[in-house]
Image (spheres, grey):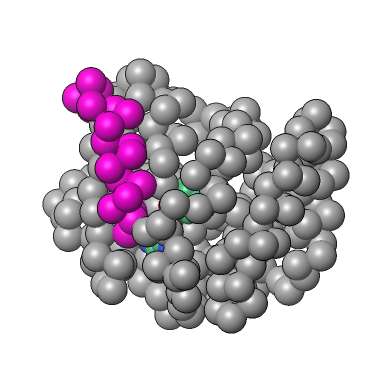
Amino acid sequence: MPSTWLDFWQQENEFDNSMSANYAYFLDRVEQYAPLNKTLRVLDIGSGPANLEDAWHDRVGELHGLDISQRYNEIARAKHASHPNVFFHDIPADDYLNFDVVAGKQFDLIIVMSVVQYYRNAGEVEKLLANIKSLAAPGAKALVCDLIVEEGVLGDVLSILGRSLRQGKLLSMLNLLFRLRFSAYYKIRQDNGFLIVPKSEWLAMCKRLNLNARFVDEPITMQQERQNLLIQF
Ligand SMILES: C[S@@+](CC[C@H](N)C(=O)[O-])C[C@H]1O[C@@H](n2cnc3c(N)ncnc32)[C@H](O)[C@@H]1O
């Protein structure tokens, strides 16, 4: 049984097939902040089973996914084998802020969705922001999404249940939460927790790095109190 988040993502898990419902909610909203076009070069940090690439492979110029999970990257590569503009890169699980695999590239849109909570500390988050800055083309945008900025597991659960009810997906969400309760995920969450970085700390980091950033006003992920940071280069 895995004991850390890094190990968790290397193994088959409850999120393999269930992330797409959450992702559809985001896809319906993201384009008002990041309009797409056929020349856009997109970087997807923590790309998982390729939800973004599935939706956008024929709507943008190039898509590059980065993930510590070779298992997800293999699944993702198999799905996109016939798409020459879609790439998945392995990043080292023990050195996950080393983005050498895309060194020298420039991106017009950088998405980080539901990943930062698995980092170890805020110093790593600041390094992520510095990496994003070094990979952003002039005029680029970055969206760092689904951020946990305050304590409150119950609020998180109630919020996703309420939103699932409104989306007509309550039963599948209850099913997922039930399976999670008895899975490695629950134990790892108890032992390791999620990284929580308050909004003020995010903004202070952006200021130190001289980034033009703000939190998006409306929720763009199913968990409504999670926050989404938009950076404009
Ligand atoms: C909840 S999933 C989200 C996947 C995808 N972004 C989505 O929303 O469908 C978290 C993903 O982040 C990856 N991940 C976890 N920690 C990471 C890290 N430190 N660096 C890069 N990816 C990481 C996991 O392997 C997994 O694919």
Residue displayed at 73% across by 44% down: 175
Q: Nearer the viewer, residue 195 or 33?
A: 195
| 67 lies left or right of 224 | left
Q: Which residues are magenta?
A: 67-85
The spot of residue 194 in percent (x, y) is: 59, 72
The residue depicted at 55 percent of the width and 79 percent of the height is 192
- Tell me, yes or no, whether the highlighted magenta stretch contains residue 68: yes
The quadrant holding residue 227 is bottom right
Count all numbered tags in the image, as a single digit.
0
| Residue found at x 70% / y 62% | 181
Above or below — where is 58 with respect to 48?
above
Asked if residue 192 lies left or right of residue 172, the reply is: left
Residue lying at 28% horizontally and 53% vertically, measured from the top left: 70
Query: What is the x, y in percent for residue 90?
Result: 24, 54
Question: Residue 187 sits in which quadrant?
Answer: bottom right
- Ligand 1 picture quarter: bottom left
Seen in the picture, residue 121 relative to 115 is either above or below; the reply is below
Vertical arrangement, residue 174 with respect to residue 213, above or below: above
Q: Is residue 41 visible?
A: no
| Residue 68 appears in the figure | yes
Q: Of residues 6 and 150, which is closer to you in this image?
A: 6
Determine which quarter of the picture holds residue 39.
top left
Estimate the x, y position of residue 186 in percent, counting from the top left. Answer: 63, 67
The image position of residue 156, as x and y in percent, is: 76, 59
The answer to whether residue 74 is left or right of residue 219 is left
Q: Is residue 117 magenta?
A: no
Residue 100 left/right relative to 50: left
